Image (cartoon, rainbow, N blue to C red):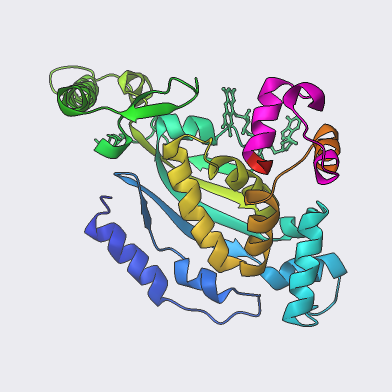
Amino acid sequence: MTLTPEQLAEIAEARATTRPTLRATSEGMERHLYVAHEVLDHGLVRVIDYMGDDAAITQAARVSYGRGTKAVQNDEGLIRYLMRHWHSTPFEMCEVKFHVKLPVFVARQWIRHRTANVNEYSARYSILDREFYIPAPEQLAAQSTVNNQGRGELLEGDEAQRVLDILRDDAMRAYDHYENMLSQEGQKGLARELARMNLPANVYTQWYWKVDLHNLFHFLRLRADAHAQYEIRAYAETMCGIVKDWVPLAYAAFEDYRMGGATVSAKGVEVLKRRLAGEAVTQESSGMSKGEWREFEAVWG
Ligand SMILES: Cc1cc2nc3c(=O)[nH]c(=O)nc-3n(C[C@H](O)[C@H](O)[C@H](O)COP(=O)(O)OP(=O)(O)OC[C@H]3O[C@@H](n4cnc5c(N)ncnc54)[C@H](O)[C@@H]3O)c2cc1C
């Protein structure tokens, strides 16, 4: 990650300036506030602001006047109940605002999550930095032969080197041309809003991304999952660590019921009951398609 000394000083200054407040704070989240967590080669995630803590969830669920906390065990039980029964609005009472620096192709997947508020760095207004995502060798993999939406074996030796060279050279050449088109030396200089279209999708962009905890959990469920592309997963996993410190009880319930849990169809429930009764059920006798059965067996064995 390439934070300038000025940016680091701004973060240090923000962390050194404390204010008394009547509002609920989370000790775990206070440790993360403003701190830049490195992701990929030039990316980052940092928390700019947040509202609420575990108690804010139970307080909203009980619609109480004060903090509403009976006891930590009560709060834990209530939060687990809310998560288990998809009673989601109390989780919407917590909000978080992130500053994220990410490659454009990751941003394109990320922006599909419509339930957040976004403000992106303007490449019409400002000149983009010469920063491009180049995968680490352990991420440079071939097309998967079993999953059309995934990677398989690693590229090695000359092929890996050739691919890395192409990625670097193309990025640098495109940026040289970008700068050249913008330049006003001996020419009018192309508008920034047009010159940027020449840059590849691995160029870095930045945004502020604000979301409530319910929708953040939805994002993390999809993007910290093994099916998500590694690059967006790297961000989601960093955010999981932050959320775990922010709202430990809610995160534990999320891990248990969503990340680690499994949904089962009515047909699946039937198969499980039949199996428990000692019947050897096969895909053919299950009523499930081959694909469904494969996924069912992956969870239930
Ligand atoms: C592994 C993976 C592979 C994917 N592959 C593809 C792909 O090949 N092509 C592709 O185009 N996308 C793909 N996506 C994106 C995916 O289809 C969703 O667009 C993305 O995950 C955002 O999910 P969401 O709509 O639930 O989230 P959000 O936009 O955050 O919405 C959250 C929830 O709010 C509700 N909601 C929000 N807006 C609306 C609306 N306008 N109308 C109705 N309900 C709404 C829905 O219940 C939704 O689930 C992929 C996602 C993943 C995780």
Compared with 165, 2 (above or below) is below
Residue ID at (30%, 58%): 7
The image quarter in which residue 199 lies:
top left
Where in the image, quadrant-wise, is ligand 1 located?
A: top right
Magenta stretch prevailing secondary structure: helix
Could you say where residue 243 lies in the image, as x and y percent from the top left? 56, 60
Compared with 11, 264 (above or below) is above
Q: Verify whether residue 293 appears in magenta.
A: yes
The image quarter in which residue 84 lies:
bottom right
Could you say where residue 259 lies in the image, as x and y percent from the top left? 62, 50
Residue ID at (85%, 77%): 65
Residue ID at (76%, 21%): 284
Using the rendered image of the protein, determine whether residue 146 is visible from the camera's viewpoint. yes
Residue ID at (35%, 70%): 13
Magenta residues (range): 274-298
Could you say where residue 179 lies in the image, as x and y percent from the top left? 21, 26
